[in-house]
Image: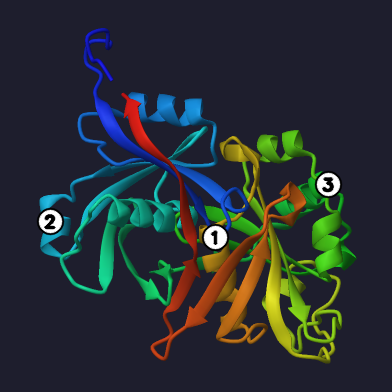
Amino acid sequence: MSTNNLTAGTVLRSYQQVDVFTAIPYRGNPLAVVLEGSGLDDDQMAAFARWTNLSETTFVLPASAEAAAQGADYRLRIFTPGGELPFAGHPTLGSCHAWLANGGKPQQPGQVVQECGVGLVTLRRDGARLAFAAPALRRSVPEPALLQAVLAALGLQPAQVLAAQLLDNGPQWLSLLLDSPATVMAVQPDHAALKNLEQKVGLASVEYSDFAPLLIARSNREARAFGSRADAAAATGTATGLQVRAFAAAIGVPEDPVTGSLNASLAQWLIAEGVLPERYTARQGAALGRDGWVHITQDAAGQVWVGGDSVTCITGTVLL
């Protein structure tokens, strides 16, 4: 391509679009990756993310000297159409996939270390797919007024909600554990109301081997937040996975197809509460015609790993 007519100050940069949390192109969560992000300022990055109009667009840069000394292989900046994020899961996996495909060589064989807004995030191979170490989680009980407003925006009744937590591993998600996968899939949110609340919301329900309804088998502080039940009877059947949806109108993404940060937080919460086993698979994206699969594992040290397939759909250059 001739550069004779390029706008002053722009550069042709290596670029990929990757589909994440799927091995089948166009069935997961797409990601735009600018592999040569040096020289771009915040406004240029934000403007390009708005133009791609994907849930996230990332820019790969050299690691800072301090982070490189601690093993970081590159620095990642992550933008939604609404602004920058300190961390996000599908951009972490997809950008690492693109970096490796573009010839990236990690400092330590067998692992990649990403520098981003929450600090250093380690990735490793999990069979044919990549997995990232979930960042430390902060969680708390949401205020009743916020819960009430969110339930109204979602069209949910308190009796359909088993537990609620504010989960924060960089992005914050108000996460609701619902009574069945059918309830999760039936929700038709008022996205404008959620945007006005400036709150990202995650919905989840456990899937059981015999399709028994989920009931948490002990008193818990999350249920007490609703004031409607403090105890629940034990469910029959074996927990086999999670059905998930994510609404992020607050950052310009009405519904996210497949969400790594949310699934990481849900795993840390629900494994700790004994609701889910140390290894399971979450499904997300069906409401948007996608087929995303998130593979969760907690290792012997208690670290939760979030894995997913990635597939490159577009390779080329972008003028920025």
Which tag, 2 or 1, sits closer to the chain's start? Answer: 1
At label 1, counting other C-alpha atoms closer than 10 Å, the crowd grade (few under 14, some 14-19, many 20 or more) is many
Q: Nearer the viewer, mark 3 or mark 1?
A: 1
Assess whether mark 1 and mark 3 are in contact (beta carbons under 8 angstroms). Answer: no
Q: Which colour assignment does the render follow?
A: rainbow
Q: Is residue 285 left or right of residue 131?
A: right
* Disc assigned to residue 66: 2
Occupied quadrant, residue 167: bottom right
Q: Residue at x 45, y 74 (%)?
A: 305
Q: Is residue 127 left or right of residue 145?
A: left
* Residue 194 visible (yes or no): yes
Q: Position of residue 184 (x, y in %)?
A: 80, 61
* Disc assigned to residue 188: 3
The residue carrying mark 1 is 21
Q: Position of residue 130 (x, y in %)?
A: 41, 67
Which tag, 3 or 2, sits closer to the chain's start? Answer: 2
**Badge 3 amino acid:** Gln
**Badge 2 amino acid:** Glu
At label 2, counting other C-alpha atoms closer than 10 Å, the crowd grade (few under 14, some 14-19, many 20 or more) is few
